[in-house]
Amino acid sequence: MRKIASPTEFRSIEDGEWYWIPRRVFEDYTSKIGVVGLALYNAYSSYARNKGVAFPSLRTLAEKLGISTKTIIKYNRILEASGLIKIERRKGSTNLITLLKVGGVKKGKFANETGSGRYMKQIRIGENNFKENKERKNNNMAVNLVLNYFREIVGETRGFEPEIDYLKDGRLVRLRLRKYSVEELKSLISWYLKSEISDKLGISISACLSAHVINLWKQSKSSSSVLERMYPKWTRNRAV
């Protein structure tokens, strides 16, 4: 006897435990507030139920959504700038969040789409500036690491302190860092100072990082690797 499949059970609003969001939030605002903003708006809708207000703590929201409190604060501003919520800041860890009527808010700083777009653009510009400043700071640290390494190793191997123009030489190092890592440039410096080429071209970072020297360094690396693959025992004994 063939077993009769049980009918598929569909969800029903009568089951309870529902919360709702306006369709326009998903259809018209997602591209502006992003998926994180949409998730945060859903969280506020869930806590508000049918009252229109919610006051979950930043920590609770961060744990539920799996993001940081800083991200919550950032997207609170975006939701507020988009005219979706109103934030009443209170003492303590919770704010009073009012879910505003979508499309029915009085024109002003937070309901005007042009204004909200401008506000969110300012947030993005600020984030980009922060990233650029961070990258610039990291790049400057890398430049100093290379220049200081050159100065130290010249002192150790040649017994004097080389002249370094931190402005001019720094630009050259920054240019090389676009293609090579700090460790690769250190390896290049060590190879250059041990080679006879440094006696011919001089002990300077500009000579060391010149395109000619870099090509010679790369050729020496490829030649060594070829020899090691063809005659591994011979190259190992030679190194000893």
Image: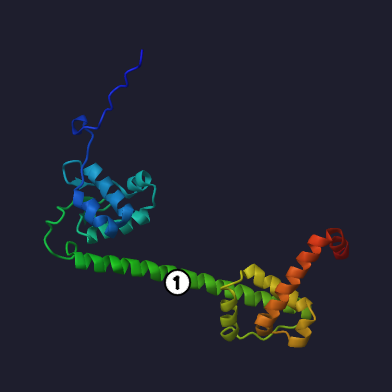
Q: Quadrant of residue 121?
A: bottom left
Eyeballing the image, is 217 above or below 201?
above
Which quarter of the rendering shows the N terminus? top left
- Furthest residue to the top? 1
Residue 23 or 182: which is nearer the viewer?
23
* In the foreground, 148 or 128: 128
> In the image, is residue 200 above or below residue 122?
below
Q: Nearer the viewer, residue 86 or 88?
A: 86
Residue visible at 32% across and 59% down?
74
In which quadrant of the rendered image does the C terminus lie? bottom right
Query: Where is mark 1, residue-wise?
Result: 133
In the rendered image of this protein, does residue 139 appear above or below residue 39? below
Which three-letter amino acid code belongs to the residue tagged 1? Asn
Instruction: Determine whether, in the image, residue 232 is placed left or right of residue 79.
Output: right
Residue 153 visible in rendering: no
Q: Which residue is most to the front?
A: 1
Quarter of the image for residue 207 reads bottom right
Q: Which residue is located at x 59 percent, y 81 percent?
A: 172
Q: Position of residue 113 (x, y in %)?
A: 19, 64
Residue at the image point whose x is 25% and y is 47% from the top: 44
